[in-house]
């Protein structure tokens, strides 16, 4: 499983108590600029990470005015080809690279791409703010979104089948999701749908914000997207896993793995294992994994990378 249930040992460090309060480890230190950083960078990949990549780029350019950074977020599947072709220096992804993608990179360069964890996300299931629904199980999500229903769930097509009454009972569930270029599409398919096929009625959207906007505009809609895209017009419902316990998509439940659709967010980079990163890319990652960079993660509505993992990524990049 690609979920991060192994974060449970870190829960003791967590002080967040409310559903969407986000805290950061006090061991994180502010970023300290260095001299001699200049050049051009391009990022191609995840739409989920698009906004936080833009925040990082803006802050980085403010510290290094001679640096130019271009951000393109059309889906995680666009990251590996751009890295392989050398048309981008950063490949943000909301899922790990597939073996075939990593192998294609290695066949050109002779080594694997370097995966850098940069944030934690709870992939949220959104309903309209006026919807009384409070919790769904993974099995129910399979019945709602999948035509395969490999979990054994019956097909669920109306709100009444989820226990809603009155005007909701007979209304069909209007479904919004991502397109197949999206890592979010693949991760939701894996965890919520046991890798089954989506129903033809799921309205595939090119971006995360479009999913949320669709749910906000349709009282009887449901969709999935990263927690960073939550707005006041939608509600993120709790989700229960195999233990049957409803879990909110908050920081504590992300770090313990209690929320069953939790994931890391990544930025991939072409790093020769026998060499360090040059200052242009190295300092960008040093910023991302600093107090300042992780505050940008929080500003975008995601959860900061647990400090111990940030130190592992810094060591992996040879930045210590």
Image (cartoon, helix red, strand yellow):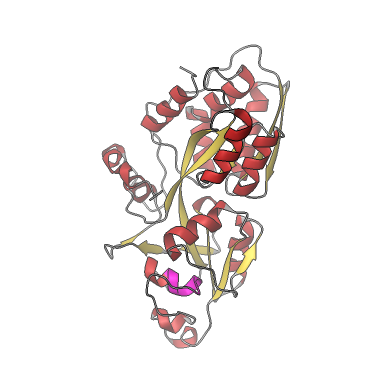
Q: Quadrant of the C terminus?
A: top left
Please determine whether, in this image, residue 75 is positioned above or below residue 222: above
Can you name the residue that lies furthest to the top here?
A: 35
Residue 22 visible from this viewpoint: yes
Comparing 214 with 1, the one in front is 1
Q: Residue at x 49, y 55 (%)?
A: 187
Q: Residue at x 67, y 21 (%)?
A: 64
x and y percentages locating residue 159 in the rendered image: 46, 80
Residue 230 visible from this viewpoint: no
Give the left or right position of residue 47, taking residue 122 as reference: right
What segment carries the magenta color? 141-147
Comparing 204 with 215, the one in front is 204
Q: Is residue 157 magenta?
A: no
Comparing 206 with 191, the one in front is 191
Q: Residue at x 65, y 36 (%)?
A: 83
Quadrant of the rendered structure where residue 7 is?
A: top left
Give the left or right position of residue 62, taking residue 139 as reference: right
Give the left or right position of residue 73, taking residue 12 as reference: right
Q: Is residue 143 magenta?
A: yes
x and y percentages locating residue 23 in the rendered image: 40, 39
x and y percentages locating residue 193 in the rendered image: 45, 65
x and y percentages locating residue 58 in the rendered image: 66, 32
Q: Main secondary structure of the magenta part?
A: helix
């Amino acid at each position: 499983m690609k979920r991060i249930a192994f974060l449970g040992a870190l829960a003791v460090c967590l002080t967040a108590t409310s559903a969407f309060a986000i805290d950061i480890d006090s061991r994180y230190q502010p970023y300290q600029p260095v001299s001699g950083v200049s050049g051009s960078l391009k990022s191609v990949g995840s739409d989920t990470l698009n906004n936080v990549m833009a925040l990082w780029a803006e802050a980085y350019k403010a510290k290094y005015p001679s640096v130019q950074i271009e951000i393109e977020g059309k889906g995680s599947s666009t990251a590996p080809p751009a890295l392989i072709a050398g048309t981008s220096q950063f490949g943000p992804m909301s899922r790990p690279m597939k073996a075939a993608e990593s192998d294609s990179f290695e066949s050109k360069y002779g080594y694997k791409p370097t995966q850098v964890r940069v944030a934690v996300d709870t992939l949220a299931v959104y309903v309209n703010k006026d919807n009384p629904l409070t919790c769904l199980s993974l099995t129910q999500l399979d019945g709602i979104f999948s035509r395969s229903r490999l979990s054994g769930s019956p097909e669920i097509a109306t709100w009444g089948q989820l226990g809603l009454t009155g005007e909701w009972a007979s209304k069909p569930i209007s479904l919004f999701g991502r397109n197949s270029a999206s890592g979010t599409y693949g991760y939701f398919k894996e965890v919520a749908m046991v890798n089954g096929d989506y129903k033809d009625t799921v309205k595939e959207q090119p971006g995360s914000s479009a999913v949320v906007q669709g749910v906000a505009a349709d009282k009887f809609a449901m969709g999935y997207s990263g927690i960073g895209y939550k707005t006041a017009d939608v509600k993120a419902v709790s989700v229960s896993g195999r233990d049957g316990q409803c879990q909110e998509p908050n920081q504590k439940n992300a770090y313990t793995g209690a929320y069953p659709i939790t994931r890391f967010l990544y930025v991939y980079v072409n790093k020769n294992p026998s060499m360090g990163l040059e200052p242009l890319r190295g300092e960008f990652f040093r910023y991302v994994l600093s107090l300042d960079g992780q505050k940008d993660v929080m500003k975008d509505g995601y959860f900061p990378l647990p400090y111990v993992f940030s130190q592992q990524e810094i060591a992996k990049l040879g930045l210590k």
